[in-house]
Image (cartoon, grey):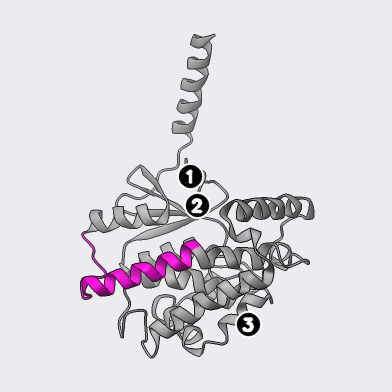
Amino acid sequence: MLLTNTCIIEMFLMIKIYFRKEYPCDTVVLHQISRGPFAPSISQYVMKLETYLRFAKIPYMNVHGSQKSKKGKYPWIEYNGQELSDTEFIIEFLNETFKIDLDEKFTAKERGAARAFQKMLEENTFWAVTLDRWLYDSKSSGFRLIGVPSWIIFFLRRNVKNTTYAHGIGRHSPEEVYHILDRDLQSLSDFIGTNKFLLGDEPCQEDCAVFGQLSQIYWHSFGNKCNTYLKKYDNLCNYCERMKERFWPDWEQCITKGMTQKATK
């Protein structure tokens, strides 16, 4: 029995290797889901990672599909045959591989503050936006716009409910969740002030993560309440437009315009 299982595993690995696609050397292969309707992706973390690749000027190519990494996550990358997942580990790897430090102009204190705001948005604000987008919207506007079948929506909504309840934020009322969201956005707005970017006139690495989170509220709220809260803060809205202009000159080619056309990039 053990021998049979071993043979099956070896056969599976051989088939996987045989059908493995070959990609250009020294090029980051970014695996992500399909392009989004109004921003290049409906994933905060895809936006974060692809913005980073553009900021760092690292050669990359996109592979769109539903295949997840070995850890069951996306986005993920391949680089010269090596697979990596989780955007933070990916960015650390690429910084080391390409000898990149996008924060070299900033002090340790500034870096620490930028890191703190990134973590606030990724570990706290993200969950409020998740509830607003995928659970509080009774019409499931976001799911339907991107073509998710009704029977799948039921399971996705249940998964969001269970995950956010386990996290803790899902135990709060919608009013309390929106209060948390607003406090986070207000803190970020107060910190940025009149800056063009998070730490001043030039962007830092953490701007990629901040933009990734805000991009979904700004472009992909699908008419839900979180966008109303963001629009209270003009400097955050201007920040989104500024990041788009700086790193996404081909933005219109990277969106489906409400799923009415196919993105060309």
Q: CA distance from mark 3 to mark 1?
A: 35 Å
Question: Quick check: is 181 in the magenta stretch?
Answer: no
Q: Earlier in the sequence, mark 1 or mark 2?
A: 1
Question: Quick check: is 111 in the magenta stretch?
Answer: yes
> Height in image: 204 above or below 49?
below
The location of residue 72, given as percent across then percent down, is 52, 44
The location of residue 149, given as percent across then percent down, is 76, 55
Kindly identify which numbered label has been placed on residue 74. Answer: 2
Q: CA distance from mark 1 to mark 2?
A: 6 Å
Q: Are marks 2 and 3 in contact (CB under 8 Å)?
A: no
Q: Which residue is mark 1?
A: 69
Packing grade of label 1 (10 A; few <14, some 14-19, many >=20) is some
Q: Is residue 54 visible?
A: no
Q: Are marks 1 and 2 in contact (CB under 8 Å)?
A: yes
> Which residue is drawn at the image coordinates 61% and 72% (left, top)?
220
Name the residue nearer the viewer: 89 or 158. 158
How many numbered dots are placed on residues in this image? 3
What's the magenta bit mostly, secondary-structure-wise? helix
Q: Which segment is the magenta one?
A: 99-123
Kindly identify which numbered label has been placed on residue 228. Answer: 3
The location of residue 119, given as percent across then percent down, is 42, 64
Packing grade of label 3 (10 A; few <14, some 14-19, many >=20) is some
> Which residue is drawn at the image coordinates 26% and 69% (left, top)?
102
Packing grade of label 2 (10 A; few <14, some 14-19, many >=20) is many
Q: Earlier in the sequence, mark 2 or mark 3?
A: 2
- Inspect the image, locate mark 1, and give the three-letter code of the amino acid beneath it: Ser
State the quadrant of the N terminus.
Answer: top right
**SS under mark 3:** helix
Q: Is residue 216 visible?
A: yes
> Which residue is drawn at the image coordinates 55% and 56% (left, top)?
33
- Inspect the image, locate mark 3, and give the three-letter code of the amino acid beneath it: Thr
The label nearer to you, 3 versus 1, is 3
